[in-house]
Amino acid sequence: MSDGQEVRKDMNRAILFLGLAALVTLAHGCAGTPDVSYGSPDQVETVTTDFGSTDLQIIAEKMVNSLLASPIISDGRQPVFYVQTVRNKTDEHIDTTAVTDKIRVTLLKSGRVKFTAIADVSDELVNQLEFQASSGMVDPATAKSIGKLVGADYFLYGELTSIRKSAGRVKDVYYKFTLNLVNIQNGLIEWADEKEIRKQAKKPLLGG
């Protein structure tokens, strides 16, 4: 074998080695940990047309502002609310507990509304009251009496619905959130509001 052939053979080996090294590096990068970063909770989320964090924030802000401006609360009273988890009537798996909690927490932070916990921890409350009253292990001076729970003045309930359509490359999703406040004494709906959201997505011509 001539010197020229030997040189070309060594160059081919070197090129092959570099190519394999590049492939190994690329494969290692793909199999490594993802590039994770923190973002602002208030950042607009438009990853998909599905119900997301921005929709939750928009709905909660609309409902809270509307309710706080109603005569039921604006007259200075601190009515007690009983809240039911928002019903999900869409075709998506949506954690509507998060919507309910967002509205409740924001209202509580306003200092103008109170919420009874009966809906969430009724069994725990009853068990604790019975324990304090009859176990003999609690100082009677600090034991809480049965029959002293505060009754709710209003019942807050709502639902989330959606209409989903697509034509060609365009997908359109319409959400409607409705919230109602019922006077428990007389059964009348004394406040109600709704928030509509429309989201559209268009697939690219290539790679869609």
Image (spheres, rainbow, N blue to C red):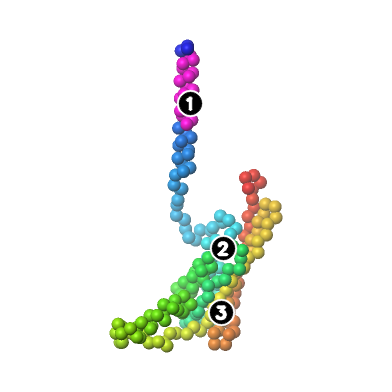
The disc, 2 or 3, on the residue closer to the chain's N-terminal end is: 2
Q: Residues within 10 Å of mark 3 (few under 14, many from 20)?
A: many
Which residue range is magenta in the image? 4-20
**Whole-percent x, y for residue 207 in the image:** 62, 45
Label 2 SS: loop
Dot in front, 1 or 2: 2
Residue nearest the observer in this picture, 129 or 54: 129
Dot in front, 2 or 3: 2
**Whole-percent x, y for residue 21 in the image:** 45, 32
The residue drawn where x is 47% and y is 31% is 20
Per the image, the residue denoted by label 1 is: 15
Q: Residue 173 falls in which quadrant of the image?
A: bottom right
Q: Residues within 10 Å of mark 1 (few under 14, many from 20)?
A: few
Does residue 124 appear left or right of residue 198 in this picture? left
Give the amino acid type for the residue marked by disc 1 in the picture. Answer: Ile
Secondary structure mostly taken by the magenta-highlighted segment of the chain: helix
| Contact? badges 3 and 1 (CB < 8 Å) | no
Q: Residues within 10 Å of mark 2 (few under 14, many from 20)?
A: few
Which label belongs to residue 93?
A: 2
Q: Residue 174 falls in which quadrant of the image?
A: bottom right
The disc, 3 or 1, on the residue closer to the chain's N-terminal end is: 1
Give the amino acid type for the residue marked by disc 2 in the picture. Answer: His
**Whole-percent x, y for residue 124 in the image:** 41, 77
Does the magenta segment cover residue 17? yes
Give the amino acid type for the residue marked by disc 3 in the picture. Answer: Leu
